[in-house]
Amino acid sequence: MKPAPFAYKKARSVDEALSLMASEPEARLLAGGQTLIASLNMRLSAPPLLIDINGIDGLDRIEASNGSVQIGALVRHAQAERDEAIARAAPLIARALPHVAHPAIRNRGTIGGSIAYADPAAELPACLLALNGEIVARGANGERSIAADDFFKGLFETALAPAEMLTGIRIPEAKGESRFGFAELARRHGDYALVGLAASARAEGKRLRDVRLAFFGVGSTAVRVRKAEAALAESDVEGAVAALDLDPAGDIHATGGVRKHLAGVLLRRVAAQLMEDRR
C-alpha cells in the first residue's frame, strides 16, 4: 500500500520544528521513521504534515558528564550500540540494544523515536524505567525534564504535551556498586519480545538496594513490579516471583498465562545476573 497524501517540511532547528507543530496539531515528526513509515504505508496513520527533524544540529550527541549520560533524540540505535561512553556509563542500554529489531532497523531507528513511540513491547522504555531515567522535552514554555516513572501513560501514550518535542534522555551514570540485568524471550531474535525484563540495583554488601524491575511485553506500557522489587531486596527470589502482580493479555503468539509464567522465568534469570557480581 501507499500512504495517504501529506505535506513535508524539513526543520533546521528545534524552534522551527516546534513552530511547525504548533501550526499543524496533527503533524508527525520524522526521525528514523522505522515505525512511522510502516504505519503510513498501511494507512494506520494519515498526518497532513511530516516534519523531518534529521537536519537539526546537536540532537545526535552522546555526552557523559556531571554524573549522568545524556543521549540525544536523533542518536541511532547502532551509534549507541557502539558508543564507549554508553558501554561504560550506561551498560544496561548497551546490553539491550542488540535485541532491538535487526541491524538494518538499528542503523536508522533513533533512541528518541523509540521512547516517544512508547511501544509496550520495546526494550528502551523498560530500560529507561529500570534506570530511573529522565526524558528531556522542549515546548512553547521551554525545556522540562519528565521522570520515566511519569512518562509512559498508556498504549502508545506519553506525558508529552501537544506541540512538545522529545529532545533527549538523561540517565544516571553507573557506579562501582551498580548492578544491571536484562533478558527477553522472543519467537526469533529481533522480533518483539513475548516478555522482557530490564533491571537495576545497587549492591550493599551481600544485599541489593534500590531494586528496579521493569517488564515489557506484558501490558499497555512497560511496567515496574514494586512488590517483587521489595522481595528481591530481601534476597527472596522465589518470593519476588510469587509477588509478580502482572495480568498480561493473550494474543496469537502466547496466552496471558504463558506470558506470566515466562515473566517468572526471566525474573529468576535476571535476579541471578544482579547477584552474581555482588561484592
Image (cartoon, rainbow, N blue to C red):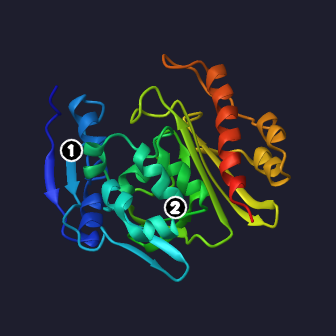
Q: Whole-percent x and y of residue 13?
A: 23, 71
Drawn side of residue 209 relative to residue 11, left or right = right
| Quadrant into which the N terminus falls | top left
Three-letter amino acid code of the residue under disc 2: Pro
- In-front residue for pair 244/28: 244
Disc 1: CA contacts within 10 A as few (<14), some (14-19) or many (>=20): some
Q: Farthest residue to the bottom: give it.
A: 66
In terms of secondary structure, where does tag 1 sit? loop
- In-front residue for pair 247/137: 247
| Quadrant into which the C terminus falls | bottom right
Mark 2 → mark 1, Cα distance in angstroms: 40 Å
Residue 136 in sight here: no
Q: Whole-percent x and y of residue 257?
A: 66, 20
Disc 2: CA contacts within 10 A as few (<14), some (14-19) or many (>=20): some
Three-letter amino acid code of the residue under disc 1: Pro
Foreground mark, 2 or 1? Answer: 2
- In-front residue for pair 217/219: 217
In terms of secondary structure, where does tag 2 sit? helix
Q: Whole-percent x and y of residue 158?
A: 49, 50
Query: Which residue position holds label 1?
Result: 48
Drawn side of residue 76 relative to residue 222, left or right = left
Residue drawn 21% across the image and 44% down it: 48
Q: Whole-percent x and y of residue 273?
A: 65, 50
Residue drawn 62% across the image and 44% down it: 223
* Dot label at residue 91: 2
Among the 4 quarters of the image, the one containing residue 15 = bottom left
Quick check: 122 above or below 131? above
Among the 4 quarters of the image, the one containing residue 243 = top right
Residue drawn 35% across the image and 61% down it: 82
* Dot label at residue 217: none
